[in-house]
């Protein structure tokens, strides 16, 4: 009876130890699962925040790209205006040169014809 009482007592202690071990493992596992769940929630919140910021950044990039494109177009137009103005200036310089030649020819023709023709009297012109 004494041996069976000790064996029964050891059996109950062993069962209690196994139950405690199982409970400790479950508690540890629950803490790990809880921590994992909390980390997952934080990661999802961070991912959502990052997505929102990425969309805002993409919109800002699109805005800057549009501004750059408009600025670039304006610079091209200024270059076109400059080329147009240079063309007009060259044409005006050529016209001026031609007019100066006409004036010079007219002046020299008048001077030579005045030297050949006798001077007119003012009374004859009236």
Image (cartoon, rainbow, N blue to C red):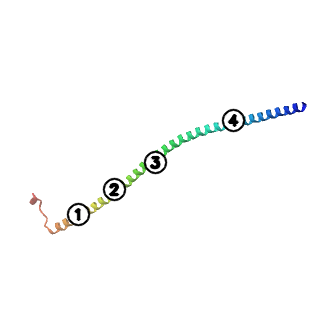
The image's mark for residue 65 is 3
Q: Comparing marks 2 and 4, which lies closer to the viewer?
A: 4
Instruction: Looking at the picture, tell me which residue is in the foreground, 25 or 50.
Output: 25
Q: Secondary structure at mark 3?
A: helix
Instruction: Looking at the picture, tell me which residue is in the foreground, 83 or 19.
Output: 19
Q: Quadrant of residue 42?
A: top right
Q: Work out whether mark 3 precedes mark 4 in sequence or the reverse, and give the earlier one.
A: 4
Quadrant assignment for the C terminus: bottom left
Distance (Cα) linking label 2 and label 3: 28 Å
Q: Secondary structure at mark 4?
A: helix
Instruction: Please rate how many residues cluster around mark 3, counting C-alpha atoms within 10 Å: few if below 14, some from 14 to 19, many from 20.
Output: few
From the image, tell me which residue sits under label 4: 30
Residue 76: image location, x then y, percent: 39, 53
Residue 10: image location, x then y, percent: 85, 33
Viewed as shown, does residue 71 lie left or right of 8? left
Distance (Cα) linking label 3 and label 4: 51 Å
Q: Comparing marks 3 and 4, which lies closer to the viewer?
A: 4
Q: Work out whether mark 1 precedes mark 3 in sequence or the reverse, and give the earlier one.
A: 3
Distance (Cα) linking label 1 and label 2: 27 Å
The image's mark for residue 102 is 1
Instruction: Write the residue at 32% across / 58% down.
Output: 87
């Amino acid at each position: 009876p004494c041996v069976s009482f000790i064996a029964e007592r050891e059996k109950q202690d062993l069962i209690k130890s196994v139950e405690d071990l199982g409970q400790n493992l479950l508690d540890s596992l629950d803490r790990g699962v809880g921590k994992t769940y909390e980390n997952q929630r934080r990661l999802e919140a961070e991912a959502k925040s990052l997505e929102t910021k990425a969309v805002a950044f993409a919109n800002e990039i699109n805005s800057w790209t549009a501004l750059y494109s408009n600025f670039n177009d304006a610079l091209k137009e200024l270059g076109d205006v400059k080329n147009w103005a240079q063309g007009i200036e060259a044409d005006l310089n050529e016209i001026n040169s031609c007019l100066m030649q006409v004036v010079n020819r007219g002046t020299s023709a008048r001077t030579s014809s005045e030297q050949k023709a006798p001077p007119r009297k003012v009374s004859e012109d009236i």
